[in-house]
Amino acid sequence: MKLQAIILAGGLGTRLRSEVSALPKVMAPVNNRPFIEYLLDDLKRQGFSRVILAVGYMADTIIEHFGKEYAGMQIEYSVEEELLGTGGGIRQAMTMSDHSAPCFVLNGDTYLELDYAKMLQKHQQRKCQLSMTLRHVDDVYRYGAIKFDDNGIVDAFCEKGESGSGFINAGTYLLEPDVFAKYDLPQKFSFETDFLAANIKDIKPVACLAEGKFIDIGIPEDFRRVQNML
């Protein structure tokens, strides 16, 4: 099966403006390379052949940099003429995916070490509509904790602000092509809040635990930290 992915690359990066003011967040320089190239390198290494970049803010900068291919992978663009939120952006990009196979979705501002083939295998064995990665952290305060049951089914999203160790949403998903079909969703919506959390009992996402490197470059402190991590 050919591996395909959508990378959400349309964010404004407001919190990162003190470090990177003239670039979209995914193009923020990490050791003199755009951050998103580290994600693409990992996808290439693990056998992906096609990547759809969901772009919005400063889309031309990203398109001009990558063109139609990167390291032998086909690159296509789902351009948001107006910001659609994470959910609207994924749904629009999914129309460009190969509907004969599930599609990975990555947050373009997050690096996660993950065995994609292993996640796909589990997804297919469980015959689920949606799988999502979870990562254990020492303090869930910034992210909000994720709860799952003994069968590995995610059953609760906790509010941000609670402290302590636990599992968080690591921001990588695997979606079946018709995952949105039966839900009445607006044009603009949050994938995490309006779709996942709101329909958690019906969707029954399968948890895939990731143990490798994980960092979200959305705040200046972590953007500085990633320079040494990668």
Image (cartoon, helix red, strand yellow):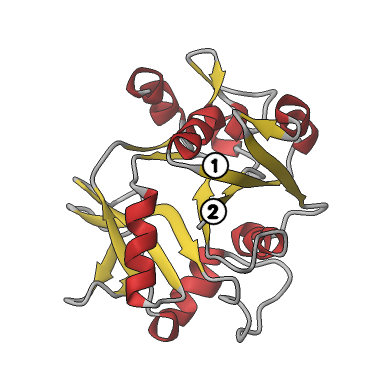
Among all residues in the image, which is located at the extreme front? Answer: 1
Give the amino acid type for the residue marked by disc 2 in the picture: Lys
Is residue 116 or residue 226 the one in the foreground?
A: 116
- Asked whether the viewer can see residue 38, the reply is yes
**Residue 183 drawn at (x, y percent):** 61, 84
Foreground: 93 or 202? 93
Task: Provide the residue designation for mark 1.
Answer: 108
Give above or below for 66 relative to 100. Answer: above
Quarter placement of the C terminus: top left
- Give the left or right position of residue 104, taking residue 166 as reference: right
Q: Position of residue 97 (x, y in %)?
A: 66, 59
Give left or right: position of 201 versus 183. left
Query: As shown in the figure, which amino acid type bears the numbered disc 1?
Result: Gly
The residue where tag 2 is placed is 2
Percent from the top left, x then y, of residue 36? 55, 32
Residue drawn at point x = 60 percent, y = 76 percent: 178
Q: Nearer the viewer, mark 1 or mark 2?
A: 2
Number of the label disc, if any, that sits on residue 91: none
From the viewer's side, name the closer residue of 124 and 141: 124
**Picture layout, residue 43 above or below residue 178:** above
Relative to 21, residue 108 above or below: below
Secondary structure, mark 2, is loop
Count residues near mark 2 (Cα–Cα under 10 Å), then give few for <14, some for 14-19, many for 20+: few
